[in-house]
Amino acid sequence: MSDTNDWQPLATAIREIYKLYLDILTKTLGFLLLGIGWVVTSASARKVIGSDDVVRWGAVLVIAIFLVMHTLATIWYVARIRDKLDLLNDRRFHLDKRYVSEFLIGKRIFVFNWSLSLLLFVVLIVLVLRVPRAG
């Protein structure tokens, strides 16, 4: 049997993954809200976006790349947490999940977070595509 303190590095890893996930989520939501606000409130932004199709589709491409990166980061989070939980379930660790439960995101909240991000990505793309062409 292993020492009862063997779970501490694992619990620390779960906490760090959780912090990283929240960091990714808050930065993504901030980027999206900033982008939406910029397109909605700035006449000069709309003028630049509407000036050329290359600019418009370039902006859509950048947003789409961020969407893919956010999705990959989300998948990474799920995989890392699943790996750590598998280790927790290993009988050699004497860790009650209560010690790390505050750092685990439930499936419903997780799906809500990702869905909210996806919705904001779509809103931003639609706003960019709906900017009238300068003319």
Image (cartoon, grey):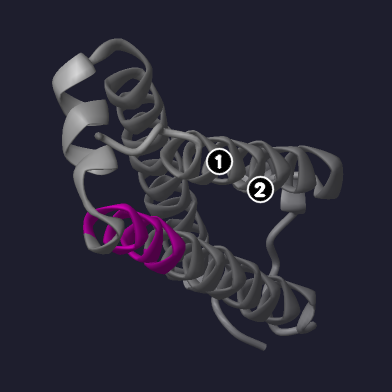
> Would residue 74 appear left or right of 109 to someone viewing this image?
left
Residue 5 visible in rendering: no
- Which element is circle 2 on? helix
Residue drawn at the location 76% of the way across and 38% of the way down: 112
Residue topped by disc 2 = 114
Give the residue drawn at x 39%, y 60%. Answer: 66
Tell me: residue 115, above or below residue 66: above
> Which residue type carries mark 1?
Val
Mark 2 and mark 1 residues within 8 Å of each other at the beta carbon: no
Which of the two discs, 2 and 1, sits closer to the camera?
1
**Against 14, is 29 above or below?**
above
What residue does disc 1 label? 126
Q: Which residues are magenta?
A: 55-65
Secondary structure beneath dot 1 equals helix
Question: Camera-side residue: 117 or 130?
Answer: 130
Mainly helix, strand or loop, the magenta region? helix
- Quarter of the image where one finds residue 33: top left
Q: Is residue 107 above or below residue 38?
A: below
Residue 124 point in image, percent of width and height: 48, 38
Q: Looking at the picture, how far across and down is residue 132, in whole percent? A: 40, 32
